[in-house]
Amino acid sequence: MKKAIDFSLNHLGIHGLPAGLHADWNDCLRLGAKGVSVFVALQLYYAFEIMIRFAKFKKDSATEKEMTKQKDRFRKIIEERCWKDDRFVRGITENDVTVGKKDDPEANIWLNPQSWAVISGFADDVRGKSILDLVHKELNTKYGARIMSPAYRKHAFDGALALLFNPSTKENGGIFLQTQGWIILAEALLGRGNRAVEYYLESSPAAQNGIADTRLVEPYVYSQFTESVDSPFEGRSHVHWLTGTASTVMVGCVEGILGLRPDIDGLRLSPAIPKEWKSFTIEKVFRGKKLNIKVNNPDGHESGCKKLTVNGAAVEPQPNPQGEGSPLEGNYIPASILKAENEIILDM
């Protein structure tokens, strides 16, 4: 991670943000050698936070101080340059053209900056819910959230290679399945279990066995992308066995929906589920210790912890030693209290 941070800090573009270089995650987004990626900027912001936690654990005050300084510096730049009206933009070209503004006739809302603003912790709960509500309104479909909208037709900037594809296919407004893991996680981090599971079910291969004639790929594997609302073949999927989707969605589901969030000192148990789920169980091996977890949700909550017991003893509310999460939740399990096998009950 330190090498990745150093690379980004040594390859800055205009306005002092991380350069998009040849492309970022989106192969068709050519912002220019000095153009900048907001997606990468938010990931870099998150990397500073993670390094701060590691530095605290290692009692490395010099690294903690440097990473805190960089995080504060980038927060100011991102706020000033990347937040426009009610959304985060996607990038800024080396010619200083902002991509993804509200008043752009095409591609005015992009998925990844909104989800990563939440994942990174840059957006607080109020702003996070606002931008994810916008995502749900403008980008969500019955097969998942589109990468951006409206698709490019006549108003693409010079580096928008997505224009080479038909609207609602590939990077031109298609549904990229890897991005679904990030939006699942983002909604879960905000405690919105209904939305998190909605996104999961819309795009999960296991939930699409009834539309095999539409989907046209194997029922047990994610595809790279699915055609969306502008296509006469909406729901048709492509490029299977060549995507990182499964691992991304697994993190969204395990750390997001099920709420198993490990850190250096233990495990935070913070599920985000549909209100209709009255209970569920998890079996997990965590650092060599067996966890038998029962989650009870009799009152129909989407998230939150009323009571947590580990081996019959109530776990008192306490702050996460790494500073993440609320000290009032009482849903943090220090690894030091775990036995070889553990019975854990969380009441939502």
Image (cartoon, rainbow, N blue to C red):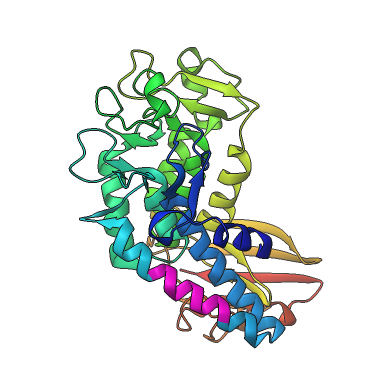
Residue 92 location, x and y as percent? 36, 47
Q: Nearer the viewer, residue 344 or 123?
A: 123
At 17% from the left edge and 42% from the top edge, which residue is drawn? 103
Residue 276 visible, this angle:
no
Dividing the picture into quarters, in which one does residue 335 lie?
Answer: bottom right
Q: Which residues are magenta?
A: 66-75
Relative placement, left or right, of 47 versus 136 is: right
Dividing the picture into quarters, in which one does residue 320 lie?
Answer: bottom right
Relative placement, left or right, of 233 versus 281 is: left
At 40% from the left edge and 66% from the top edge, which residue is drawn? 122
Residue 204 covered by magenta stretch: no
At 43% from the left edge and 73% from the top edge, which residue is drawn? 73
Q: Nearer the viewer, residue 147 or 332?
A: 147
Residue 338 location, x and y as percent? 74, 77
Q: Please determine whether, in this image, residue 193 is positioned above or below residue 6.
A: above
At 62% from the left edge and 28% from the top edge, which residue is drawn? 221
Where, quadrant-wise, is the C terminus in this rendering? bottom left
Relative placement, left or right, of 68 versus 156 is: right
Residue 231 visible, this angle:
yes
Q: Please determine whether, in this image, residue 18 is positioned above or below residue 235.
A: below
Residue 181 location, x and y as percent? 51, 45
Q: Please determine whether, in this image, residue 184 is positioned above or below residue 139.
A: below
In this figure, what is the number of numbered marks?
Answer: 0
Residue 246 location, x and y as percent? 61, 39
Q: Nearer the viewer, residue 346 or 318?
A: 318
Dividing the picture into quarters, in which one does residue 94 lie?
Answer: top left
Residue 69 covered by magenta stretch: yes
Is most of the magenta stretch helix, strand or loop? helix
Where, quadrant-wise, is the N terminus in this rendering? bottom right
